[in-house]
Amino acid sequence: MNRYLLIFVLFLVSCVEDPSIERGFYHWKQELDLTKEDKAFLNDIGAEYLYVKYFDVIWKDDQAIPVSILNVKNKPKQEVVPVVFITPDVFSNLDSSGVEDLAKKVGKKIRDVNHKLSNFEEIQIDCDWMPSIKDKYFYFLSKLGQEFEGSILSATIRLYQYKYPDLAGVPPVDKGLLMYYNMGDFSEYRERNSILNNKTGKQYLGSGDYPLPMDIALPNFRWSLLFRQGNFKQICPNFTETQLNDQELFTKMGNNKFIFNMDTVMYDTYFRYGDELRYESCSEEELLLAVDLLKKEIGSEKIRVLIYDLQNETKDEYEKLDAVFSAFE
C-alpha cells in the first residue's frame, strides 16, 4: 500500500467517533408522580427517556388480565416509552386466536393509559419467553406491531436468549433491549449476588452479533433476601446499610451476609434468631466492569443505555450513575 494512502487510512480510523449514548431510566412503580427532586435529577444527568411500565398481564381465572395499571399523576419532561410486562404462562394457556385477541386488548389498554401523556415513538414488551411459547409470543409481537404501525416495537432480551438465538429465537421487533441483570437464582443460598455478577454475565457475552439492534439496561437497585436454615423465605427490600450494620441486631458474616442476633419484628415480618439476610446491591466498581464487558458488544454508532430503575434514593447517586453512563462514551 502507498505510504501516504496508509497514513490517510489510519487517520480516518483514528477519527471514528465513540458511540453516541442516549441516557434513560426505567420507572417500575404503579404511580407516575415525579417529585421536583426527581425531575431535577433526570434533567441534570441528561436523561432523555423514561421507560414506564403501564401494566402487567397475568393469567388468572382462565384468562389474561391486566393488573398493576399505571396511575399518571404528572407528565415527565423525558420522552415516555410504554412498557408492558407479560408473564410467560399467559402464552402457555392461549391458542392462536386468543393470542391475536390479546394483542388487540393490550394495544387498547396502552392507548387508554397513555391518554394523559404525549404520543410515543416506541413500545416495549417485557416477557421472559422460552422455546415452548416462542411461536405464540412472536405471533403476539407481530400482531401488536400491526396495532401500532409507524411506531418502534422493542422487546427485552435476557442473557440466555442473547447467547442462544438459534435456540430461543429472535423476536420479530425493530430492536432489542439486553437486560444485563437478574443473572442468578436469588433463592439459591450459595449465590453471591443474583442482581449483578460479572463473572456470570461474561459467560453470555462475546458469542457474536445478535441479529437485532440492541440497547442495554443495567441495574441499580438493592434488596435483602431472607434465608432460614439455608432455605429461602422471602425478599426484604426495605433494609438499609445503616440497619444492617447495627451490631446489636446483626452479626456480619462476609461481605454481604447478616445474621439476626435476636427474635424481632420489622416491616411487618417476624424474624427469628439465626435467620440470615443476604444484602445484594450494585456497586460502582461492578457497574463499571459491566460497562467494559458490554462495550465490546456494541455494534452501532448510537446506543441507548437504561438504568433499572428510578427509585426515591436514585437522586442521591448522581455521581455514580453519571460515571456509568459516561464510561460508555
Image (tube, rainbow, N blue to C red):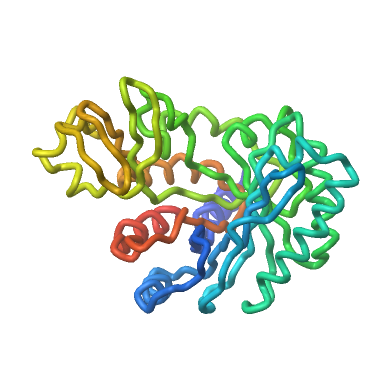
User: Who is closer to the viewer here, 164 or 187?
Assistant: 187
How far from the left and from the top, in percent, is residue 141?
78, 50
Q: Looking at the image, is 20 positioned above or below residue 6?
A: below
81 above or below 102?
below
The residue that appears at 76% across and 42% down in the rendered structure is 62
Q: Is residue 238 left or right of residue 72?
A: left
> Which quadrant of the structure image shows residue 325?
bottom left
What's the residue at 42%, 34% (across, down)?
194
- Where residue 280 appears, x then y in whole percent? 33, 39
Q: Is residue 1 above or below residue 226?
A: below
- Using the rendered view, name the quadrant where residue 234 is placed: top left
Placement of the C terminus among the 4 image quadrants: bottom left
| Residue 2: image location, x then y, percent | 61, 47
Q: How many marks?
A: 0
Q: Residue at x 83, y 59 (%)?
A: 104
Q: Nearer the viewer, residue 101 or 135?
A: 101
Residue 189: percent from left, percent from top: 37, 23
Q: In the depicted view, which residue is nearer to us: 57 or 26? A: 57
| Quarter of the image that includes the N terminus | top right
Furthest-right residue in this view? 97
> Of 277 and 221, which appears nearest the observer?
277
The quadrant where residue 210 appears: top right
Q: Is residue 162 above or below residue 6?
A: above
Task: Specify whether 293 is left or right of 284.
Answer: right
